[in-house]
Amino acid sequence: MFQPRYEASYEKLFGVAAIPPEAVFTGIELYGKEIVKIQHPNLAYCYKLDRRYFEKETGQTLIDVIKAFPNDEFLGYWLYFEPSNNRPVVSLHDNSEFFLLEANKTPDQKCFTLIELEKKDGNKTTYEYLEKSPPLERKPFKFSLEREIKRQIGSAKTFEKLNVDVLGNLFNEN
């Protein structure tokens, strides 16, 4: 359970109990830029940019991406919590952008080459990222370029706070 902290209690402000009786206390206190590790079905296939280049033959912008977390655990900085929809917001451990595979897809490969497709609608430009060479029997996977992750914590398999020493080594908080 996550609970935003305010100077005045819920009871004083709104006349309601601060913590519902059925809530489970996790014992995790999080502050900005602390390191968290999340196992979540939609975060298992998170990819970081390895190389961006222009292919002369096709005129396409291609991006080689590699799986960011081989053990399927998203490692990132805690940013804030959205109490209105029960979603923690985290960014990658190095604060970079990343590519996220469309939901409910589970590939075997650890790297992809993506085609960056630019779409213009008046003054607005958007980009779509598609797998370049899928097997013939299926459509190419779609990827989205993200800077932050917002997922409901109730869907996560695990959610842990970690400590980091001055050398960058990670330790479980115990």
Image (spheres, rainbow, N blue to C red):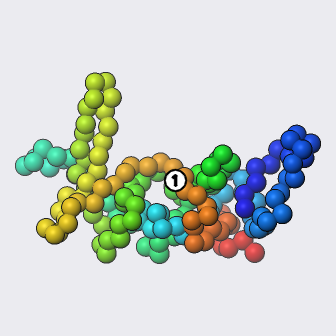
Of 30 and 95, the residue lying toward us: 30
| Residue 102 occupies quadrant | bottom left
Looking at the image, residue 117 sits to the left or right of residue 21; the answer is: left
Q: From this viewpoint, which residue is outermost toward the top?
A: 123
Q: Residue at x 84, y 63 (%)?
A: 21
Residue 48 seen by the camera? no
Of 109 and 140, the residue lying toward us: 140
Q: From this viewpoint, which residue is outermost toward the right?
A: 12
Looking at the image, residue 75 sits to the left or right of residue 144; the answer is: right
Residue 132 seen by the camera? yes
Q: Position of residue 59 (x, y in %)?
A: 12, 44
Q: From this viewpoint, which residue is outermost toward the left?
A: 57
Looking at the image, residue 107 sits to the left or right of residue 165; the answer is: left
Q: Position of residue 53 (x, y in %)?
A: 22, 50
| Vertical side of 141 occupied by 144: above or below | above
Q: Residue at x 39, y 65 (%)?
A: 104
| Vertical side of 167 occupied by 53: above or below | above
Label 1 neighbour load within 10 Å: few <14, some 14-19, many 20+: many
Looking at the image, residue 69 sits to the left or right of residue 24; the answer is: left
| Vertical side of 5 occupied by 112: above or below | below
Q: Residue at x 43, y 73 (%)?
A: 70
Q: Secondary structure at mark 1?
A: strand
Q: Position of residue 2 (x, y in %)?
A: 72, 57
Rendered-image quadrant of the C terminus: bottom right
Amino acid under disc 1: Ile
Q: Residue at x 72, y 62 (%)?
A: 1
What residue is pinned by disc 1?
149
